[in-house]
Amino acid sequence: MGTPDPNQPNPGSIKRAMNILIGHPLLVALLVTGLGTAAITITYLNDSTMTADAIEAPIQFEEGDDTTTTASDYVNTFTISSDATYFTASINGVPEANLTIESFVKIKNTDDSNSHDVTLTTSQVSSAEVDDYTLIILDTDSNTLDVLDFTAASPSATATLPASTTYEVRLHLELASGATLTGGLERDITLSVG
């Protein structure tokens, strides 16, 4: 027997490798897959095209019937954004009294074909000066659908607006005795549409 050729595999090594592979079929599959990978790239000749357009918001805010007429002493300002997707309001409460504005704001479904779920959320008001602070979503028969309670831990209210329907939102604010509301009660209200 002469010197083993370094370019030829050792018969014992081949036998050990075969025994390992026979006992591990997953390893065989991985090796075959790795060996079968080709460096082929396909580039399509036509590009995909995407455009974006703006449409009217399906859910919009409208000024309530009582916001500027009968509630003028209690509503300092009330404005609706140009696209009616948010409102800005400043109200006055009275200590030891309930302020209720029946038609504070409206939520309108401008979609003629589909109903939409709307959710109002905000951050909690935790003040000893505030006994009750809510926005109450009313259906077309003035039934309460849900209440956004600003004093709750995670204020949230949800309603389903049928196609081409407008719901009233009632505001209720009850201040404690001696309330001054130093620093105010400014809160952002988020409207989510589903």
Image: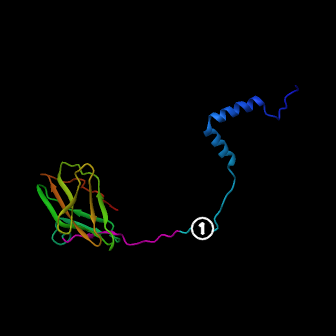
The kind of residue tagged 1 is Asp
Can you see residue 92? no
Considering only vertical position in the picture, is 25 above or below 52? Answer: above
Instruction: Say left or right for 27 vs 66.
Output: right
Query: Residue placed at 83% from the left, 32% from the top?
Result: 6
Quadrant of the image containing the N terminus = top right
Q: Residue 59, position in %: x, y?
A: 32, 68
Q: Mark 1 points at which residue?
A: 47
Between 53 and 44, which is closer to the camera in this rendering? 44
Can you see residue 42? yes
- Label 1 Cα crowd, 10 Å radius (few <14 / some 14-19 / many 20+): few
Instruction: Say left or right for 82 vs 134.
Output: right
Q: Give the range drawn in magenta.
A: 50-65
Circle 1: element type? loop
Query: Residue placed at 63% from the left, 38% from the top?
Result: 27
Dominant SS of magenta comes to: loop
Instruction: Say left or right for 128 vs 115.
Output: left
Question: Is 163 inside the magenta-drawn segment?
Answer: no
Q: Residue furthest right?
A: 2
Kindly indicate the quadrant of the structure image that contains residue 175.
bottom left
